[in-house]
């Protein structure tokens, strides 16, 4: 038997797949710490706002962990699944079934149950606000069908998914029993904000993009949003390399940037929201226009490698 030590990837730290996920662990630890502090010491507006931001961050961590598990050890990944389930207020299996096995498979096309244009090919404030509610109405029937199939084909996986539901519902029940007002304000409201982001991000990234095009099916955001939220804005690179670690997306984004319609590359997330959802509500000049009428020049010039 060889006695040579097993070499780890340069990016790894012990069982952690990539050292950049120290940031993920900080977010996952900070969120319950802030909730617990306010539970015992009273509501603090600044801490509550930070809790809302971390709720959004955890939704991105949820997304990243579903694509590429954070750890190289199965048991630690399962523990992280339960941790994210508790902090997100939604089982992680739901995201896998609706996102990985559906959205990435069909890439916002006609067979994608989460496609934004099934509710109207729009891109404005009310569309963004309502999209999570509309998506939930079609996503959950899809999830129930998937769970019924999994129960028959993979009973062990189905039992694991049940444990995730027990974790979520059990935590809510416990906290609501202890103090309904604190549970709603300090835990459930931030979780609902994070869940809204989780679903509404699909609208931000795909509304008025062109899913008939090879490269223009997603909107990309550059700037400050990426270091704060794990490069979530670089969406084309993520779709093209779904198993790439989020820290690799800036390099991949530079590879695809020139192939994407410039109207789908936003230098600032805040500027996009201000222009499209605020100014666009007030004046037609700033309103978004759909690219779904046909392939763009950038798409037609793209050649598969």
Image (cartoon, rainbow, N blue to C red):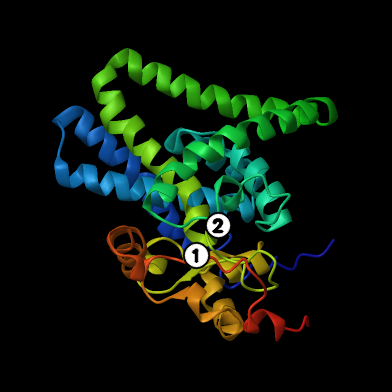
Quadrant position of the N terminus in the picture: bottom right
**Whether residue 12 can be seen here:** no
> How far across and down, in percent of the image, does residue 233 sit?
47, 66
Is residue 22 positioned above or below 134 on the image?
A: below
**Neighbour tally class for label 2: few under 14, some 14-19, many 20 plus, Cα within 10 Å:** some
Q: Position of residue 213 (x, y in %)?
A: 68, 71
Question: Secondary structure under badge 2?
Answer: loop
The residue located at (30%, 64%) in the rendering is 283
Determine contact: label 1, label 2, CB under 8 Å: yes
- Judge whether 273 appears above or below 161 on screen: below
Left or right? Give the position of 131 relative to 280: right
Badge 2 is on which residue? 16
From the viewer's perspective, is 210 left or right of 191? right
Look at 57% across and 39% down and name the residue there: 92
How many residues crowd around disc 1 within 10 Å: few (fewer than 14), some, or many (20 or more)?
Answer: some
Q: Horizontal and vertical percent for residue 288?
A: 44, 66
Using the image as rendered, state which of residue 180 and residue 302 is in the foreground.
302
When asked about the image quadrant of residue 178, the answer is top left
Query: Relative to residue 240, is residue 266 drawn left or right?
Result: left
**Residue 235 rendering spot, x and y as whole percentages:** 55, 66
Can residue 260 be seen here? The reply is: yes
Q: Which mark is residue 19?
A: 1
| Residue drawn at the location 61% of the way across and 36% of the way down | 138
Q: Quarter of the image containing the C terminus?
A: bottom right
Disc 1 to disc 2, how far (Cα)? 7 Å
């Amino acid at each position: 038997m060889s006695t040579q030590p097993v070499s780890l990837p340069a990016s790894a730290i012990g069982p952690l797949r990539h050292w950049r996920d120290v940031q993920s662990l900080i977010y996952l630890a900070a969120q319950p710490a802030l909730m617990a502090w306010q539970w015992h010491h009273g509501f603090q507006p600044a801490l509550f706002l930070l809790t809302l931001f971390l709720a959004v961050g955890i939704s991105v961590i949820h997304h990243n962990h579903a694509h590429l598990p954070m750890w190289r050890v199965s048991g630690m990944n399962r523990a992280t699944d339960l941790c994210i389930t508790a902090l997100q207020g939604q089982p992680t299996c739901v995201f896998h079934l609706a996102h990985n096995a559906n959205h990435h498979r069909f890439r916002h096309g006609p067979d994608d149950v989460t496609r934004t244009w099934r509710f109207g090919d729009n891109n404005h404030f009310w569309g963004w606000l309502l999209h999570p509610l509309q998506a939930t109405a079609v996503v959950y029937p899809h999830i129930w069908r998937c769970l019924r199939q999994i129960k028959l084909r993979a009973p062990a996986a189905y039992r694991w998914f049940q444990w995730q539901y027990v974790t979520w519902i059990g935590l809510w029940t416990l906290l609501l029993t202890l103090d309904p007002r604190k549970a709603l304000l300090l835990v459930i409201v931030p979780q609902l904000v994070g869940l809204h982001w989780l679903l509404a991000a699909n609208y931000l990234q795909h509304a008025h993009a062109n899913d008939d095009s090879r490269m223009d099916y997603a909107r990309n955001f550059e700037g400050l949003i990426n270091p704060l939220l794990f490069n979530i804005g670089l969406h084309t690179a993520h779709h093209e390399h779904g198993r790439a670690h989020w820290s690799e997306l800036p390099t991949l984004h530079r590879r695809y940037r020139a192939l994407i319609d410039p109207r789908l590359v936003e230098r600032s997330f805040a500027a996009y929201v201000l222009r499209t959802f605020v100014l666009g509500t007030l004046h037609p000049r700033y309103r978004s226009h759909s690219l779904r009428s046909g392939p763009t020049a950038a798409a037609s010039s793209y050649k598969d490698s």
